[in-house]
Structure formats: structure tokens, C-alpha cells
């Protein structure tokens, strides 16, 4: 009997040992799986930190979007993406500024207004809408219906400091599997990084524009003009091309101001700047030099060409229906123009400006509303 019991005890102990080993193996397997998941999350976080650094270390919009898309496609394996944003701060619509995996005609159907109800829906769904989970919404929204027709699945807004300035939409994955919660988090986090980077780039661009442009007319200011003229003369020397400078002044501008007030005088300068911008070539540079004086840089234009351009400009200004032009002595707004050319008249930018200025005053002294070429 004793031997019998001892054998039974040994069997029970052996069974218990195997049971304990199985539990340990299962726990070890769970621990290893959990470890892998943690390592994957750490790796993803490291990637996101690096992406954030890269996005915020550049100020060029194209480069920012390229970096964003590179990581978006790499991490989520999405088939398509459309980025909507306003083309100007005053636009009331968000239109596609970049799209991939979708044709141009289809992408352009995704234009949406700043106040579209879609943004309220996004706010209600924690700033990310998953269409395959909320298919019923596509029937209530024309915009979401278009998104669904293009087989797009995720939408999230571009928002920074409570300022909404766009929307990002991505399509299905290449394997057609639904996006996991972790992938949705990655998408929203990446897009938040994009929003911050784009916002910073646009603020910098606006600051740069303000520093280089005249606040009244929107033309380049004298600082930009001086730098650009130096650059263009250096280029003209290198390639042995001519360059002409046109300086112009509004005739009897003081009379216009005295008769109508400075606000109307400002309006006249703004209107004149618009006419100048429409008259020049794309390669020409128009700047407000000071007061009612303007300069135009004409790259690769010799003396005769500058004279032809100036006469055409003078006639255009004289015939233009500026507001309340009848108060001027001749019943219309006119300009006096002086031109000087590199290398015929001057070799340096300062000399060229001085010669064009002298020619302009010669035009004024000879009766105004005329062109004088420096001689």
C-alpha cells in the first residue's frame, strides 16, 4: 500500500511540474509579445519625434509636404492622399494643393468651404473621421459623398492654435484592411505636425513679404529694389547683356492731394501700381522708390527697347480712367519718365539710378508727361 501511494504522489508531482511549466511558457510568450508591442511603439515614437524635427526644421512648403507624405505612405501604406488648403489668406475655400494616387479631375471635386458642416462633424469625432465606420454620414454631406466615391477613408483637419486652414484626406490601404486605432493615431499625429510646420512656414513667408514690400501698394520696396538691381547688374556683366532702368514720377501729385485729400492720393498710387504691374513683363521688377516715384528694372533691354516701353507706359497711364482724374491740370493723370541703360550710361547700380533720376527730372523740366533718355 505504501509503495502504491508513493507512485501516485510522484505522478501527481510530475503532472504539477508540467502544468507549472506550461503556465510559465504561456506567461513568457505573453511577455515577449507585449515586449515586441512596446518596442514597436517606442520605434514609432522615435520615428514621429524625428519626423516632427524634420518638418519644423525647414520653411519651404514643398519640402514640408514631401517629408510628410514620405512618412505617411511609409507608415500607413495608403493608396492615395489629398491635401486641401486655401490659396490665399482671404479665400473662403479650401482647394487641393497636393494630391497623389488620385487624378487631377477627381481631386478638384474635393473643394470645400471654410464653414462647411464637415468641420463640425470632425470636431464631434475627435478631429478624425473614419468613413467606413460612419458610412451614413456620406448620405447627409455632399462633400463626404464625393470623398466616399473616391474610396477615401480618413479625414482630419489642418488646425494650429485654433486656426483652421485645411484638410487632409487619405484613401484605402494597399491591402484593403481597415486602419487600426494605432494607425489612425499616427495619421492624426503626423497631420498635426504638418499643420504646425505649414503654419510656421506661412508666417515666415508673410513676414518676409512684409519686409520686402511697400505696405500701401504691395510693390517691392526700395530695400528689395536696391538688392535686386545689384544682382541683375552682376548677371548682366557676366552674360554681357544690357539692362535698363526706368524711373517715373506722378505729375502734379501735390495738386491731386491738395484737391482731394491724402486718402484719395493713396488710392491713386495703389491704382497706378496695379497698372504698372499689368504693363510689365513677368521678368521685370516694379518697386515703389519713395513718395510718388516708382522704378522698373528691365533685364536684357537696351536703350531703344527701354524708350519704346516707356512711351507705351506713358500713353497707358495718360489714357487710364483713374478716379477723379479731372482735378489734374490737364484733366488726366500723367507721369514723367527717365531711362538709363547698363552698360551705355553706367557700370554700377548707384550710377544707373542717378542717371535715370536725372533723365526723369529732365522730362519734368521739359513740360511733364514725356519720356527722357539719359544722354
Image: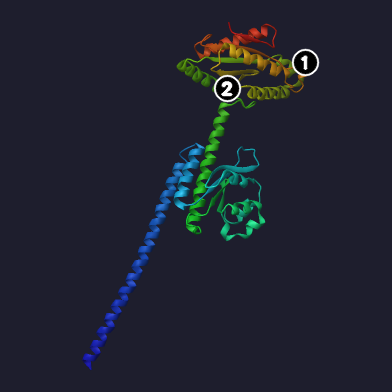
How many numbered dots are placed on residues in this image? 2
Disc 2 secondary structure class: strand
Q: Is residue 58 left or right of residue 283?
A: left
Locate residue 325, reporting x and y percent.
Answer: 76, 19
Residue farthest along the bottom direction in this orientation:
1
Locate residue 313, reporting x and y percent.
Answer: 66, 17
Q: Residues within 10 Å of mark 2 (few under 14, many from 20)?
A: many
Residue at 66 percent of width and 14 percent of height:
311
Q: Is residue 52 left or right of residue 31?
A: right
Q: Residues within 10 Å of mark 1 (few under 14, many from 20)?
A: few
* Quadrant location, the N terminus: bottom left
Query: In the depicted view, which residue is nearer to us: 101 or 87?
Result: 101
Indicate which disc, 1 or 2, sits on the residue closer to the N terminus.
Answer: 2
* Quadrant location, the C terminus: top right
Locate residue 267, reporting x and y percent.
Answer: 70, 25
Residue 285's disc is 2
Q: Is residue 72 left or right of residue 137?
A: left
Q: Which residue is mark 1?
A: 331
Residue at 72 percent of width and 24 percent of height:
263
Choose top left, top right, bottom left or bottom right for residue 13.
Answer: bottom left
Residue at 56 percent of width and 23 percent of height:
283
Type of colouring:
rainbow
Choose top left, top right, bottom left or bottom right for residue 20.
Answer: bottom left
Q: Is residue 106 above or below residue 8?
A: above
Query: In the depicted view, which residue is nearer to us: 338 or 19?
Result: 338
Q: Is residue 275 above or below residue 155?
A: above
Residue 47's disc is none
Q: Using the rendered image of the protein, determine whether residue 296 is visible from the camera's viewpoint.
A: yes
Q: Is residue 125 left or right of residue 322?
A: left
Disc 1 secondary structure class: loop
Locate residue 211, reporting x and y percent.
Answer: 56, 28
Amino acid at each position: 500500500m505504501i509503495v502504491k501511494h508513493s507512485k501516485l504522489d510522484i505522478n501527481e508531482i510530475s503532472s504539477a511540474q508540467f502544468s507549472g511549466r506550461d503556465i510559465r511558457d504561456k506567461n513568457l510568450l505573453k511577455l515577449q509579445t507585449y515586449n515586441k508591442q512596446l518596442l514597436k511603439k517606442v520605434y514609432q515614437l522615435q520615428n514621429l519625434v524625428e519626423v516632427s524635427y524634420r518638418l519644423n526644421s525647414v520653411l519651404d512648403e514643398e519640402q514640408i509636404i514631401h517629408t510628410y507624405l514620405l512618412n505617411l505612405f511609409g507608415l500607413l501604406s495608403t493608396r492615395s492622399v489629398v491635401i486641401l488648403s486655401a490659396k490665399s489668406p482671404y479665400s473662403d475655400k479650401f482647394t487641393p494643393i497636393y494630391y497623389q494616387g488620385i487624378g487631377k479631375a477627381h481631386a478638384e471635386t474635393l473643394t470645400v468651404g471654410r464653414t462647411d458642416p464637415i468641420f463640425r462633424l470632425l470636431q464631434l469625432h475627435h478631429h478624425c473621421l473614419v468613413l467606413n465606420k460612419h458610412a451614413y454620414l456620406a448620405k447627409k454631406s455632399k462633400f463626404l459623398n464625393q470623398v466616399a466615391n473616391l474610396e477615401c477613408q480618413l479625414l482630419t483637419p489642418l488646425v494650429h492654435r485654433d486656426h483652421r486652414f485645411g484638410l487632409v484626406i487619405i484613401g484605402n490601404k494597399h491591402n484593403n484592411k481597415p486602419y487600426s486605432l494605432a494607425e489612425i493615431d499616427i495619421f492624426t499625429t503626423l497631420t498635426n505636425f504638418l499643420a504646425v510646420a505649414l503654419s510656421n512656414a506661412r508666417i515666415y513667408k508673410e513676414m518676409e513679404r512684409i519686409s520686402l514690400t511697400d505696405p500701401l501698394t504691395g510693390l517691392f520696396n526700395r530695400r528689395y529694389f536696391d538688392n535686386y538691381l545689384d544682382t541683375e547688374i552682376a548677371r548682366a556683366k557676366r552674360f554681357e547683356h544690357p539692362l535698363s532702368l526706368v524711373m517715373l514720377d506722378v505729375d502734379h501729385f501735390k495738386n491731386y492731394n491738395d484737391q482731394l485729400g491724402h486718402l484719395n492720393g493713396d488710392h491713386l498710387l495703389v491704382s497706378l501700381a496695379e497698372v504698372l504691374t499689368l504693363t510689365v513683363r513677368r521678368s521685370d521688377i516694379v518697386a515703389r522708390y519713395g513718395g510718388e516715384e516708382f522704378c522698373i528694372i528691365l533685364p536684357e533691354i537696351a536703350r531703344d527697347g527701354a524708350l519704346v516701353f516707356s512711351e507705351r507706359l506713358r500713353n497707358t497711364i495718360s489714357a487710364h480712367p483713374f478716379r477723379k482724374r479731372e482735378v489734374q491740370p490737364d484733366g488726366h493723370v500723367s507721369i514723367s519718365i527717365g531711362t538709363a541703360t547698363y552698360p551705355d550710361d553706367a557700370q554700377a547700380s548707384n550710377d544707373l539710378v542717378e542717371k535715370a533720376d536725372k533723365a526723369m527730372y529732365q522730362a519734368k523740366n521739359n513740360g511733364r508727361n514725356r519720356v527722357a533718355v539719359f544722354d
